[in-house]
Amino acid sequence: MRLQQLLFERTKSTEQGLTLIECLMGILILTSILVGIAPPLGIVVATRVQNRRAEQAQHLAQAEIDRIRVLVAQRGYTNADLPPLGTDAPTAIRSKLRSPASCSTEDYQNISANELMQVDVNGDCQPDFLVQSLLSNTQGIAGQPPGRFTMTVRVYAGSARNNVGSLSTEQASLKLAGGEGSQRTNPLAVVQTEIFALDSNNVGCILNSSLCIE
């Protein structure tokens, strides 16, 4: 009887030991798996953040285009209401801020061609994006604001402020990456379109380019 009890206790102890080892092995395997998938997961998350930021930039660019399109359609605008003439990359940041909050100070007046507008999108009064709006190929009647022009909008990430002076005009490439990559120097979105005012003078200008001035 005593022998049977000893054998039972030894068998039980052995089974408990195996269970403990199995648990430890399971923990080690799980840890190895987590360590293995952590870098790819980090890259995927970073890429999703970049894509989301690029999507916001695209919306901002289109909103700026729409703002000028509506302004021109309503007529009565002046040269000061329009973006400046230019094509070059920005080299300065405008001090005013465009924001949905009460801290907004942007009036869109007298913006220089080399300036970036600061834009806050979440209402925390901190610039999330930098926007450059430019006109080119302007046509219109002498003594009046242009009635036809090409408008270009470039939207940079807020972090691009650290590289002002060496920014590019080529749109940043979105690819699987763990960092911002070219988004620190290249615009997240570039939108270009032609806008014209449909008043009697400008219609004639559009139909007959000899009536226009550049």
Image (spheres, grey):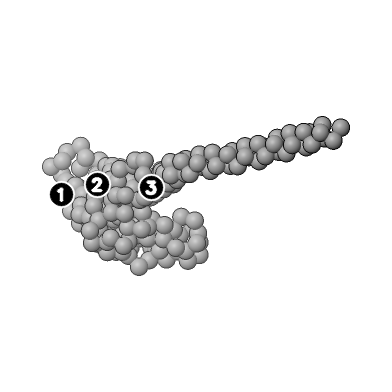
Q: Which mark is residue 170?
A: 2
Which x, y percent locates residue 54? 38, 45
**Category of crowding for the residue at label 2, using alpha-carbon neighbours closer than 10 angstroms: few (below 14), some (14–19), many (at least 20):** some
Residue extending farthest to the right is 1
Side of 185 relative to 60 (left or right)? left
Identity, as a three-letter code, of the amino acid under mark 1: Ile
Residue extending farthest to the bottom is 95
Which x, y percent locates residue 210? 13, 42
**Category of crowding for the residue at label 1, using alpha-carbon neighbours closer than 10 angstroms: few (below 14), some (14–19), many (at least 20):** few
Residue pictured at 28% horizontal, 60% vertical: 163
Mark toward the viewer: 1 or 3: 3
The residue beneath circle 3 is 178
Q: Is residue 77 above or below residue 202?
A: below
Residue pictured at 25% horizontal, 40% vertical: 203
Q: CA distance from mark 1 to mark 2?
A: 30 Å
N-term-proximal mark, 2 vs 3? 2
Q: Secondary structure at mark 2?
A: loop
Which x, y percent locates residue 193? 28, 42
Number of callouts in the render? Answer: 3
| Residue 73 visible here | no
Q: Which mark is residue 142?
A: none
Side of 9 relative to 45 (left or right)? right
**Displayed quadrant of residue 132:** bottom left
Image quarter where the N terminus lies is top right
The residue beneath circle 1 is 213
Q: CA distance from mark 2 to mark 3?
A: 21 Å
**Displayed quadrant of residue 84:** bottom left
Q: Is residue 82 above or below residue 103?
A: above
Side of 119 relative to 4 (left or right)? left
| Residue 132 visible here | yes
